[in-house]
Image (cartoon, rainbow, N blue to C red):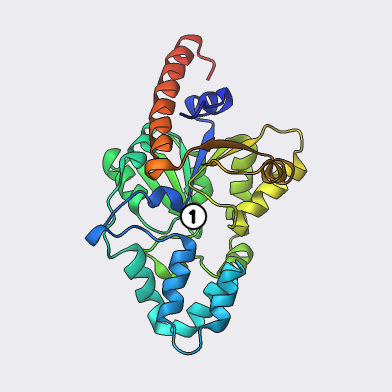
């Protein structure tokens, strides 16, 4: 069981935490014929398999972990078959939410950020909250207003877009560059959240260039600021953990991946209880 740092409990209880949900969270869901949402490398391999012509260069890029370049070439190769690939992997299986989505929702964070393009958590949160969860994509004009928020809704920010608008998805190296150029105000708003909130990464990797850049800027601009948290499986070396601390101001929270990450699910349930207890205490002191 994870021994959650008091900083995480207090930040979530005071709704001063941002939860970042990666592909590992969606992976807990199942859809048609037992399908699970693909991880990034699995998606790329399926794209390579569908691509016409020689696959040698794409396979090399995949092996070398140059995932953005690999994806770019897949998109070029598939042309009009690119969107069907996305829909087949992220939409048509009709993925259903799992227990982990319920625990995340019960934390009642004001803001959830996700690079996931599927709609698993989005649909669950909207239904569970009776339409009081607002979904905003990176390219929408009123994102900054939504971030300010009200007591009437909780916010889910789709930083790479959503499968229901495939033309705006951020998947390739070109997509990242275009988004950074065209939607600079959105990224400035996210930078503000990284400064004012405790950010907790769940089911995420460190390969996303947007996230890495935001963390690097935060760590170097505000070197004395409190850390953010990266929840991951055991096996992280001391050197890698030190790199995350020095370059990204990230603290590692580890758990065992056994039995399909059962410890994370149980630990999130315990975190919900700890947060609820802390909120009861805060309601008496009013030190929100």
Q: Nearer the viewer, residue 72 or 137?
A: 72
Residue 147 vs residue 173: left or right? left
> Does 239 appear above or below 278?
below
Give the residue at mark 1: 115
Q: Position of residue 256 (x, y in %)?
A: 48, 38
At mark 1, the secondary structure is loop
Height in image: 214 above or below 53?
above
Q: Where residue 197 sits in the image (x, y, percent)?
A: 59, 35
Tell me residue 75's x, y (percent): 48, 78
**What residue occupies the far left of the structure in this picture?**
33
Q: Residues within 10 Å of mark 1 (few under 14, many from 20)?
A: many
Pick the front one: 33 or 276: 33
Can residue 107 be seen here?
Answer: no
Count of labels in the image: 1
Residue sitting nearer the eye, 235 or 112: 235
Give percent across and percent down for residue 100. 36, 40
Identity of the residue drawn at 55% across and 52% down: 205
Residue 251 visible in rendering: yes
- Above or below, 110 relative to 3: below
**278 sits left or right of 199 in the view:** left
Q: Looking at the image, which residue sits at the far bottom?
A: 53
Which is nearer the eye, 110 or 243? 243
Residue name at image x 46 percent, y 36 percent: 110
Q: Residue at x 41, y 26 (%)?
A: 270
């Amino acid at each position: 069981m994870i021994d959650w740092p008091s900083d995480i409990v207090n930040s979530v209880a005071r709704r001063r935490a941002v939860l970042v949900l990666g592909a590992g969270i969606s992976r807990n869901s199942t859809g048609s014929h037992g399908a699970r949402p693909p991880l990034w490398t699995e998606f790329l391999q399926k794209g390579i398999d569908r691509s016409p012509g020689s696959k040698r260069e794409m396979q090399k890029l995949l092996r070398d972990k140059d995932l953005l370049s690999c994806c770019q070439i897949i998109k070029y190769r598939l042309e009009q078959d690119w969107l069907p690939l996305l829909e087949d992997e992220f939409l048509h299986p009709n993925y259903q939410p799992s227990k982990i989505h319920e625990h995340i929702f019960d934390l009642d964070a004001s803001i959830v950020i996700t690079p996931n393009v599927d709609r698993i958590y989005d649909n669950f949160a909207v239904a569970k909250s009776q339409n009081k969860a607002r979904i905003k994509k990176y390219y929408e004009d009123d994102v900054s207003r939504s971030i300010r928020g009200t007591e009437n809704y909780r916010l889910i920010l789709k930083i790479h877009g959503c499968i229901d608008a495939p033309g705006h998805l951020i998947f390739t190296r070109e997509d990242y560059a275009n988004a950074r150029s065209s939607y600079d105000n959105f990224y400035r708003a996210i930078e503000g959240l990284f400064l004012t909130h405790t950010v907790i990464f769940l089911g995420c990797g460190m390969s996303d260039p947007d996230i890495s850049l935001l963390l690097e800027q935060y760590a170097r601009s505000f070197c004395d600021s409190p850390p953010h948290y990266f929840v991951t499986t055991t096996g992280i070396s001391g050197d890698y953990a030190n790199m995350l601390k020095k370059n990204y101001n990230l603290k590692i929270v580890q758990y065992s991946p056994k039995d399909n990450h059962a410890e994370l699910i149980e630990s999130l349930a315990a975190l919900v209880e700890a947060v609820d207890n802390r909120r009861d205490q805060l309601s008496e002191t009013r030190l929100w």
